[in-house]
Image (cartoon, rainbow, N blue to C red):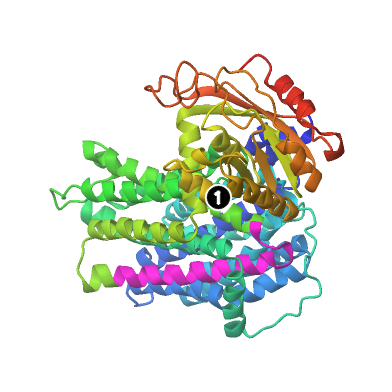
Amino acid sequence: MDNNDQVETRSQFALLKKRRFAPFFWTQFFGAFNDNVFKNGLLVLATYSVVFQTGVNPDTLNNLGAGLFILPFFLFSALAGQLADKYEKSMLIRYVKLLEIVIMVLGAICFYFHQTWGLMLLLFLMGTQSALFGPVKYSIIPQHLKPGELVGGNALVESGTFVAILLGTITAGVVSQWEQGPQVLGVFVVGCAIVGWLASLKIPPGPAPAPGLTIRYNFIKESWHTVQFSRENKSVFLAIMGISWFWFLGASYLTQIYNYAKVDLGGAESVATGLLAVFSIGIALGSLLCERFSGHKIELGLVPLGSIGLSVFGLDLYFHTQPVSGTELVGLGEFLKEPHSYRVLLDFLLIGVFGGFYIVPLYAMVQERSEEHHRARIIASINILNALFMVVSAAAAVLFLGVLKLSIPDFFLVLAVMNLVVAGFIYSIIPEFFMRFLIWMITHTMYRVKHVDLKKIPDEGAALLVCNHVSYMDALIIAGACRRPVRFVMFKPIYDMPVLNFIFRTGKAIPIHSKKTDPVTYENAFKRISEELRAGEVVCIFPEGKLTGDGELDEFKNGVEKILEQDPVPVVPLALRGLWGSFFSHKGSSAMSRLPRRFWSKVELVATDPVPAEQANAAMLREKVLALRGDWK
């Protein structure tokens, strides 16, 4: 097995042993952890410690702190994106981590001398440091990871970030209650910043994609320009909006979690911490499961699945929040004695899991489809819009909870419904998401598909795929397995089938019919095939021209030779194994004429080395496909 094949089967956790990823992962992990130790330590001390109190209402102070941390994302994200595109990225990361050390040293001094307002100012500087780190963080990932590792790498980053947030929040809560808590916090955050900087020293170079870029410092103009810049690619911009919507939902849930635990569940702070822990673990788990469910490729079908889960379990949370029976707040242990408590915990866990399904493919999609020379600036636009959406989430909470006097469960209901509306809007504009979702659902409920040697399909440039034709699901299985989009040439009656027609149209499939029956469709098909190949796309044909009626491989028609004569591109033979006898095959009777008896059955899709166009002909390609298929039909 070569290195490329190993990428397809290796667990994402293997990246934690690689220098091209591990130092970066630990750098961002300790950064996120330190941010939350500092922020939450400050807020706990300002709320509960007499010497840190300022006379300002704690709720006001909390909101002020949140605002001071978010404000730099508006002010400096555009500059950060320009810097990350202009300069070598590992060097930038080290400078940013040095800035973190300076901020934390000042923070330790403020903790020691009980300077709450000094710590609030440093919260603004921490937001600045995070704003500078964001674009370089996400733009260096595709420079160091292979395409088949992007989902796994992003999953580790997202799961690591939420675990760091959870651990940082818990650490701050525990240490802040110690007698020498402020001093310990000061030493702790400085030490953590130093560890993060040491990890950054091992990050490999990330070459500057646009060294000739002229830096512009007008943050208002450049922020607007950065967001407009991201709109040039429609699908990328919609993915960015989807990411920002996730942060709207996340901020809404996390902001209300303490009041929800107290008012609606009758729980003490430990109950809120438990809910936060379950939510964070859910996102980490969902992020890590993305790689397994996506088959080491960017599977956009998981995004609608995530949307559905976010709304379903948001609604379930509303319906299963029981009224509080007493006035005394209960701890986590007492809370867990109530049977309905586990339903609430399960809802928070699954909201997190489906949030992971939703967010990881979107980040990977933005990285993959953005031009390298301005990728960091596009990621900077994510930070700007994320900050904007988080501010809007706070305003929405004020509107629904303060002005309209809804309860927090009612607010969760509104969020679940709003999520369905937003999802429907995005998927109606970019139907590729829903198309991939249908493919994913069909291929993951009916079959267990194993991929063998699909790296034989070129990562770039035109190619023609030829495959045996066993069932109506053949094109969906191939589409779900291949990393690159595939333009399928298919028999027009199949192309016109309900439900499948939506998938085929969205996937830009090419309908074809016999020259005798429908000469216009026949000629248009070859014209479209030529256009797609000349545009550098991958085209797949089933040279038998129809589904097999006996499970055997029929003669390959000469249409493949006509295609290669006009556009001589490499041909990759494929073979499907295990589909004969399924509900969608013609074994025993016409396909789909009887109840399905096989679910989640094992199927394989196998590829072999590309054949140069000048060596390919119908008979030879048939022999190669037959050899790949073997005796397993």
Residue that sits furthest to the right in the current view: 614
Q: Main secondary structure of the magenta part?
A: helix
Q: Nearer the viewer, residue 504 or 219?
A: 504
Q: Give the residues in magenta.
A: 369-398
Q: Would residue 258 be seen by someone viewing this image from the given angle?
A: no
Residue 131 place in picture, x, y as percent: 59, 69
Under tag 1, what secondary structure?
helix
Instruction: Return the x and y of residue 392 as percentages of the image width and height.
Output: 39, 71
Q: Which residue is mark 1?
A: 361
Please rate how many residues cluster around mark 1, counting C-alpha atoms within 10 Å: few if below 14, some from 14 to 19, many from 20: many
User: Relative to 508, is 529 on the left or the right?
Assistant: right
Please identify the quadrant where the C terminus is shown. top right
Look at the image and say whether residue 390 sits in the magenta stretch: yes
Query: From the viewer's perspective, is 607 left or right of 265?
Result: right
Q: Nearer the viewer, residue 397 or 610?
A: 610
Relative to 570, is 395 above or below? below
> What residue sits 56% from the left and 32% below the top?
474
Query: Quarter-wise, where is residue 100 in the image?
Result: bottom right
Residue 146 in the image: state x and y as whole percent: 72, 46
Q: Quadrant of the N terminus?
A: top right
User: What residue type is disc 1 on?
Assistant: Pro
Tell me where residue 564 appears, x and y as whole percent.
78, 42
Asked which quadrant contains residue 389, the reply is bottom left
Q: Is residue 214 above or below residue 3?
A: below
Q: Nearer the viewer, residue 612 or 152?
A: 612
Q: Residue furthest top?
A: 631
Residue visible at 29% across and 72% down? 398
Please say if 480 is above or below 555: below
